[in-house]
């Protein structure tokens, strides 16, 4: 409800402030149909695109967390159900695999003067997506509690463990940590984060063969298990949405949260202002003496469907240009880490910026990555619960991946 | 009835059954014999906000060509059924050869995804079904005995668990058993164990799912038995009373035999329903500790970037075979009874 209010207020402020520019995106005619994930920054972008609606231009949107599951059938249809698919570096892969999105070079040349070079996502030299925000999982911490315990913000996961121990031993918090450990996508993502931190490669070079059942994989699992020792026993159900109320209840002190959510944690209208005030962000920690943070970098951007008329494609591109105009980054600086020119980092962006500065690796944009992700999410929780060895869990995940990859034609 | 008339009567139903039941099953069976084409990949330079790298991409045009030639994909025969995601014959053989004793073998077998799911599915079916019948029967007896004035409201309240959408019911209970929820916190207090979590422990998760299953389905068997109780012949009951039968004896020797066909009916429905257990696993986020055959199908269809249609189809066929095996004894029994009567 609160989110909805915030989005409404944001949209309202937008309409009021930009009253002059209303409906003047220079689009003659066309239909813009946006499909995207459902979080604040994307609401802002879509609201910006919607302002291009006029007597001859229609703009509709469907913002849903299920976007990944409907984008393929929706863009396979001819004409496509949506003209714009807002994606991240994992969800663009199936669209590329299916050949469902069009190169944007012409449109960028004609209407993309506002774009930074870094916003262009080029595959084989062709612009296939326009990125407009960066995202990553990084550390959120309670500076008041860490000060109370007399510890500095941790820089590595080994220090996170020590800090958690101090917080528990001093009786400040019983279970000071939380990571997104819900089996499935979240848990797999924490594995990938940590594995990247140890510097491991997920696949044998140049092949689709998984190579996770190795020393780095075991170390990754053992670190995750050590961290669960300082989490509430309900950690098996933690995802981004489940952790926020626990944070607001003041029961945890260090979490690995998404940059796109940071703004809401320190918002002026937070239901618990004293906790919001004490919330601070930092780079994702390193691990195991590695030199890159144990996390992955993400971008969010938009793509234009292939199966639509050129007229609609142009209208869609220009509407999205309006949605991601430099003014957006100025007016909504705290909503995201914008890649748009004119953006000035806000306190909510500290974590993402530090993580990027520490040279975290981007999440691999590989065609078969999704299958490994699923296999990991289904198979590693048994180790965390002490039901099987790390080697067995990794072997199970590898077997599940291999079966799926064979069936999907990535492996022979 | 002449055969012609009979045929004319039954033709619409037959046609509907063929279109809505037989055809989909056949298409799923056909689908299960295929897997995707081998992916033609190319290495291309990919640049984004965080720099450039060389990554493998699927060659869309080459794939479209393959897809045109054979749209179903690559014929795999029964390969999907026997791979390690399903019946896992090779893994079974390996476990058989390498395990020193039965318990290690059983443990390794139950670690294979299909058998793990089958174990929970069967446990759920065989624990929840009898409990649902027993609870439903006793609730029906109790409700039948209360004064007519409050009967209506009581029946309505007893039916509530069935009226609540399964997923919502599961979610409500899910938050109640949370370590910070009313049931979870109370249990921690009662057992004086702050680390007690109904969500984390596999055994307790199973128990919670069973309890939920009984809670959700008992109203169904209650209402069936309650309807049945209205048809128990009064004179037989009264003569039993004159013969000096106690209340329990009347239930045991008059009511129960009269309701036996209903017990068979409820058992059939519940066996089928419980074998397809799915919503509570999603609602309770219980996939870490309990998966069912239906859950495997669901997770195949939502696998990463490319749904595993062949794998989901194979699991669906195995589920159908499972239901048939489960129902056979009940159906045979019914058939014999039917023959005896006619």
Image: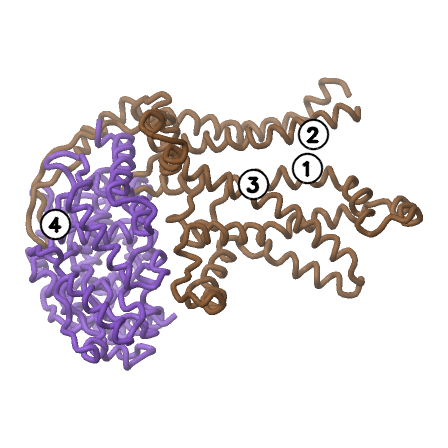
Chain colours: A purple, B brown
Task: Report the residue at 62% width, 44% height from top.
Answer: B130
Q: Residues within 10 Å of mark 3 (few under 14, many from 20)?
A: some
Q: Quadrant of the C terminus of chain B?
A: top right
Label 4 is found on which chain of the structure?
A
Residue A167 locus on image (x, y percent):
24, 72
Q: Which mark, residue B334?
A: 2
How far is the residue under mark 4 from the one under mark 2?
A: 66 Å
How far is the residue under mark 3 from the one under mark 1?
A: 15 Å
Q: Return the disc, 3 or 1, that comes first in the chain's sequence.
A: 3
- Give the structural element (helix, strand or loop) at label 3: helix
Task: Report the residue at 64% width, 52% height from top.
Answer: B219
Mark 4 vs mark 1: tell me if same chain. Answer: no
Which residue is more in the foreground, B53 or A312? Answer: B53
- Give the structural element (helix, strand or loop) at label 2: helix
Decide: is A24 above or below A146: above
Q: Is residue B196 visible?
A: yes
Task: Please identify the quarter of the rendering in which residue A317 is found.
Answer: bottom left
**Mark in the foreground, 3 or 2:** 3
Residue B162 locus on image (x, y percent):
60, 53
Is disc 4 in contact with disc 2, using a CB cutoff of under 8 Å?
Answer: no
**Mark in the foreground, 3 or 4:** 3
The residue carrying mark 4 is: A121
Mark 3 vs mark 4: tell me if same chain. Answer: no
**Mark in the foreground, 4 or 2:** 2
Residue B275 locus on image (x, y percent):
52, 39
Q: Return the disc, 2 or 1, that comes first in the chain's sequence.
A: 1
The residue carrying mark 3 is: B126
Label 1 is found on which chain of the structure?
B
Which residue is more in the foreground, B239 or B188? Answer: B188
How far is the residue under mark 3 from the one under mark 2?
A: 20 Å
Mark 4 vs mark 2: tell me if same chain. Answer: no
């Amino acid at each position: 409800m609160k989110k909805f209010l915030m989005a409404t207020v944001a949209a309202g402020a937008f309409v009021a402030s930009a009253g002059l520019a209303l409906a003047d995106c220079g689009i003659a005619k066309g239909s813009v149909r946006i499909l995207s994930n459902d979080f604040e920054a994307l609401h802002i972008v879509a609201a910006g695109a919607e302002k291009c609606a006029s007597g001859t231009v229609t703009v509709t949107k469907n913002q849903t967390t299920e976007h990944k599951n409907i984008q393929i059938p929706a863009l396979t249809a001819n004409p496509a159900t949506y003209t714009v698919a807002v994606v991240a570096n994992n969800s663009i892969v199936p669209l590329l695999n299916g050949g469902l999105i069009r190169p944007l070079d012409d449109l960028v040349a004609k209407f993309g003067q506002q774009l930074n070079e870094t916003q262009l996502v080029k595959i084989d030299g062709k612009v296939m997506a326009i990125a407009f925000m960066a995202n990553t999982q990084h550390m959120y911490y309670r500076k008041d509690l860490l000060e109370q315990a007399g510890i500095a913000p941790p820089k590595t996961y080994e220090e996170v463990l020590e800090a958690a121990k101090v917080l528990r031993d001093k009786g400040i918090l019983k279970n000071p940590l939380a990571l997104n450990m819900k089996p499935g996508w979240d848990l797999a993502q924490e594995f990938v984060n940590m594995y990247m931190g140890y510097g491991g490669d997920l696949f044998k070079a140049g092949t689709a063969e998984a190579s996770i059942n190795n020393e780095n994989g075991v170390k990754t699992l053992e670190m995750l298990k050590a961290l669960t020792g300082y989490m509430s026993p309900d950690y098996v159900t933690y995802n981004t949405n489940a952790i926020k109320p626990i944070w607001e209840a003041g029961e945890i002190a260090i979490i690995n949260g998404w940059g796109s959510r940071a703004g809401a944690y320190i918002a002026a209208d937070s239901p618990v202002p004293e906790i919001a005030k004490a919330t601070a962000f930092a780079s994702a920690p390193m691990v195991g003496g590695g030199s890159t943070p144990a996390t992955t970098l993400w971008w969010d951007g938009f793509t234009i469907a292939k199966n639509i008329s050129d007229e609609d494609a142009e209208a869609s591109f220009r509407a999205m240009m309006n949605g991601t105009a430099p003014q957006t980054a100025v007016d909504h600086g705290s909503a995201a880490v914008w890649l748009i020119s004119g953006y000035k980092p806000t306190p909510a962006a500290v974590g993402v910026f530090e993580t990027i500065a520490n040279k975290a690796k981007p999440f691999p944009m590989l065609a078969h990555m999704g299958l490994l992700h699923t296999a990991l999410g289904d198979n590693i929780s048994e180790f965390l619960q002490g039901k099987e060895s790390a080697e067995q869990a990794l072997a199970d995940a590898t077997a599940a991946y291999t079966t799926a990859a064979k069936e999907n034609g990535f492996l022979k | 009835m002449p055969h012609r008339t009979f045929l004319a009567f039954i033709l619409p139903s037959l046609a509907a059954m063929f279109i809505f039941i037989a055809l989909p099953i056949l298409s799923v069976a056909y689908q299960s014999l295929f897997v995707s084409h081998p992916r033609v990949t190319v290495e291309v330079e990919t640049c984004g906000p965080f720099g450039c790298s060389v990554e493998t991409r699927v060659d869309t045009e080459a794939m479209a060509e393959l897809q045109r030639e054979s749209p179903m994909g690559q014929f795999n025969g029964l390969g999907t059924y026997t791979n390690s995601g399903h019946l896992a014959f090779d893994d079974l053989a390996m476990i058989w050869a390498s395990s020193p004793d039965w318990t290690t073998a059983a443990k390794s077998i139950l670690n294979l995804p299909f058998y793990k799911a089958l174990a929970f599915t069967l446990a759920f079916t065989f624990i929840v079904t009898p409990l649902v019948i027993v609870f439903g029967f006793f609730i029906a007896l109790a409700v039948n005995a209360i004064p007519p004035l409050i009967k209506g409201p009581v029946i309505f309240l007893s039916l509530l668990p069935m009226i609540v959408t399964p997923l919502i019911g599961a979610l409500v209970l899910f938050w109640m058993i949370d370590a910070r929820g009313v049931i979870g916190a109370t249990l921690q207090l009662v057992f004086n164990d702050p680390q007690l979590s109904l969500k984390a422990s596999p055994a307790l998760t199973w128990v919670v799912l069973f309890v939920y299953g009984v809670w959700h389905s008992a109203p169904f068997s209650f209402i069936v038995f309650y309807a049945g109780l209205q048809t128990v012949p009064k004179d037989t009951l009264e003569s039993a009373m004159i013969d000096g039968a106690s209340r329990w004896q009347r239930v045991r020797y008059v009511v129960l035999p009269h309701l036996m066909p209903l017990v068979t009916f409820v058992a059939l429905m519940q066996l089928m329903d419980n074998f397809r257990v799915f919503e509570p696993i999603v609602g309770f986020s219980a996939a870490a500790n309990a998966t069912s055959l239906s859950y495997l199908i669901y997770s195949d269809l939502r696998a990463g970037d490319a749904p595993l249609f062949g794998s989901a189809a194979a699991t669906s066929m195995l589920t159908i075979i499972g239901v048939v095996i489960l129902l056979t004894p009940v159906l045979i029994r019914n058939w014999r009874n039917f023959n005896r009567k006619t």
